[in-house]
Amino acid sequence: MRAVLVAAHLLAVIVLAIPDAGGVALRRDAWANPTVQAELEGWAERLTSWGMPIETPELEQRVYEIAQSWTQALHTLRTPLRPYRDVFGVRQTWRMFVAPHRHPGRLHIDIERDGQWRAIQIARSDQHDWRAPQLDHVRMRAMLFRYGWKRYRRRYDALTRWIATKAAQDFPEASRVRVRLFVYQTPSPSQVREGWEPEGRFSQVVTHRLEDFR
């Protein structure tokens, strides 16, 4: 009887731990992200070179349909296990990393003083390191990864208000604070060896009057 119970428990945990494509992964607007599109283009090129020609839009549609079917099948399989999962806490809600983030957003914070903007925080910069223990913390970096996606805009706006509150305290002579993300494509190994500097653009630019936070 003990062996049966242990085997049943292991089977339940394995079924519950099988990755699915639920949540954000099935939102079509999320698939428009440059990192996702780059992965699809790369796989379309690989499949074509292997003798299976396919265009990126067709591959995207096929993968999306497979993800939908896979997720629905897992949902059906897991339904009887939900009471066991909830009682004993054997749940796994994380979707593991499937690809490197090739178009990250690097946090930039500037203050305006006497009509001039000055950088006070650039993520992982030794020179512009205002509140680095907080803003460069591993947990903050995980949050910023999410906030670069459109569906997290409200949380990003909340972060900018928190930053404005702290900037108003630390820079009483400043009039405004500007928070933005520098979005760029990560360099290849050869570009890193050559000292290549990434080119990109600023996104999600939010400016606050510091007077409103004092």
Image: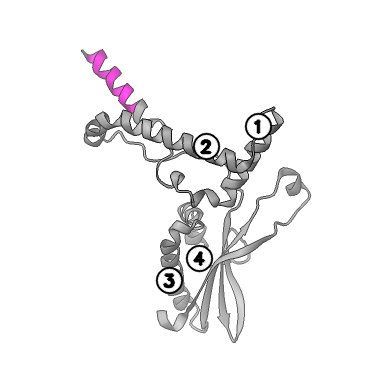
Mark 3 Cα-neighbour bin, 10 Å: few <14, some 14–19, many ≥20: some
Q: Position of residue 143 (x, y in %)?
A: 46, 55
Q: Which residue is mark 1?
A: 47
Between residues 167 and 142, which one lies in front from this camera angle?
A: 142
User: Of circles 4 and 3, which is in front?
Assistant: 3
Picture quarter with the N terminus: top left
* Residue 4 visible in the current orientation: yes
Mark closest to the chain's N terminus, 4 or 2: 2
Between residues 28 and 13, which one lies in front from this camera angle?
A: 28
Q: Which residue is mark 2?
A: 63
Instruction: Compute the Cα span from label 4 to label 2.
Output: 42 Å
Q: Which residue is mark 4?
A: 131
Residue drawn at (36%, 36%), measured in percent from left and top? 92
Q: Secondary structure at mark 4?
A: loop
Instruction: Compute the Cα span from label 3 to label 2.
Output: 39 Å
Mark closest to the chain's N terminus, 2 or 1: 1
Q: Amino acid at mark 3?
A: Arg
**Residue 161, which numbered label?**
3
Q: What span is colored magenta in the figure?
A: 2-13
Mark closest to the chain's N terminus, 3 or 2: 2
